[in-house]
Image (spheres, rainbow, N blue to C red):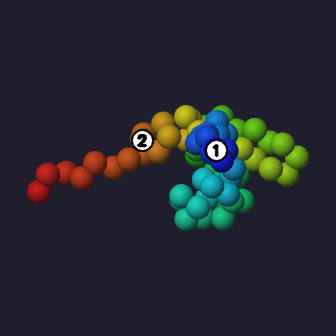
Amino acid sequence: MPYEKPEITPEWMKATEVAAVLGVDPRTVIRMIKRGDLKVRALEIGKSVRVHREDWQAEMERRRVVPADA
């Protein structure tokens, strides 16, 4: 029976993953976090920045625009 890799969602996202969703450069994401434009917990590990996934999802939900009825 072959080993199947379990589907694991990491608790922390790379700044490059966040940048891909926003369509910006990863350095822009880091600047947004430092300025407080993105209200998320972030870890800086060496030159790598990680964003807490739950905070990211909450921030995106907060920013979601609901279209008005026509």
Q: Total number of numbered labels?
A: 2
Q: Amino acid at mark 2?
A: Glu
Kind of residue sitting beneath label 1: Met
Q: Residue furthest front?
A: 1
* Within-10-Å neighbours for mark 2: few <14, some 14–19, many 20+: few
Relative side of 47 to 63, left or right: right
Q: Is residue 17 visible?
A: yes
Name the residue tied to disc 2: 61
In the foreground, 51 or 2: 2
Mark 1 secondary-structure assignment: loop
Disc 1 + disc 2, Cβ < 8 Å: no
Q: Position of residue 14 (x, y in %)?
A: 69, 50
Give the answer, above or below, for where 29 lies relative to 36. Answer: below
Q: Looking at this view, is 60 or 36 the one in front?
A: 60
Residue 34 in sight: no
Q: Quadrant of the C terminus?
A: bottom left
For residue 10, above or below residue 29: above
Locate residue 20 relative to residue 50 in the image: left or right: left
Which label was assigned to residue 1?
1
- Indicate the position of residue 69 as horizontal and vertical percent values: 14, 52
Q: Earlier in the sequence, mark 1 or mark 2?
A: 1
Q: Which mark is residue 16?
A: none
Q: Quadrant of residue 3?
A: top right
Which quarter shows the N terminus?
top right
Image coordinates for residue 2, horizontal then vertical, percent: 66, 47
Q: Quadrant of residue 20?
A: bottom right
Q: Residue at x 80, y 50 (%)?
A: 48
For mark 2, give the secondary structure.
helix
Give the alpha-carbon distance from disc 1 to disc 2, as whole Å: 41 Å
